[in-house]
Image (tube, rainbow, N blue to C red):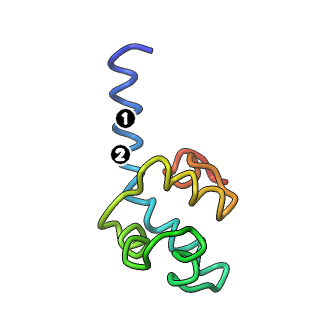
Amino acid sequence: MSQVNMFDTFCVIILNMKKFHEKLKELRTQLGISQDKVAKDMGLTRAAYANYEQGIREPSLEILKVICDYYDVTADYLIGREEY
């Protein structure tokens, strides 16, 4: 992959990460569960999880894997590269 294509891909990922927090909240509310429950199930503090949902912080790759497993979605979905 050329440096230009890598840069373009990186830019798309960064721009779509702005939607990450919206998708995260949507997944949780669709299940009708609280931030407290999700955070506890994932081994996080509620404050850390809330920061992800509010777009204040972004999760590490390790936490992203945990989130994907919990909601049974792909990382591509969460960062806006695919619909499901």
Q: Nearer the viewer, residue 30 or 40?
A: 40
Residue 16: percent from left, percent from top:
42, 51
Looking at this rendering, what residue extends furthest in the top direction? 2
C-alpha distance separating marks 1 and 2: 6 Å
Q: Decide: is 69 above or below 33.
A: above
| Farthest front residue in view | 43
Which residue occupies the foreground of this view, 20 or 36? 36
Q: Which mark is residue 10?
A: 1
Residue under the point 57% across and 51% down: 65
Left of 80 or right of it: where is 55? left
Asked whether the beta carbons under mark 1 and mark 2 sit within 8 Å of each other, the answer is yes
Q: Residue at x 35, y 45 (%)?
A: 14
Above or below residue 32? Residue 68 is above
Q: Mark 2 is on which residue type?
A: Ile
Amino acid of disc 1: Phe
Label 2 sits on a secondary structure element that is: helix
> x%, y% of residue 33?
61, 84
Where on the picture, by quarter, is residue 45?
A: bottom left
- The N terminus, quarter of image: top left
Quarter that holds the C terminus: bottom right
- 10 Å crowding of disc 2: few (<14), some (14-19), many (20+): some
| Of 63 and 52, the residue lying toward us | 63
Rendered location of residue 42, percent (x, y): 56, 68
Please tell me which residue is depicted at 63% across the width and 50% down the height of the picture. Answer: 74
Q: Position of residue 32 (x, y in %)?
A: 64, 85
Q: Which residue is nearer to you in this view: 21 or 64?
A: 64
Residue 79 horizontal side relative to residue 70, left or right: left
Residue 14 tag number: 2
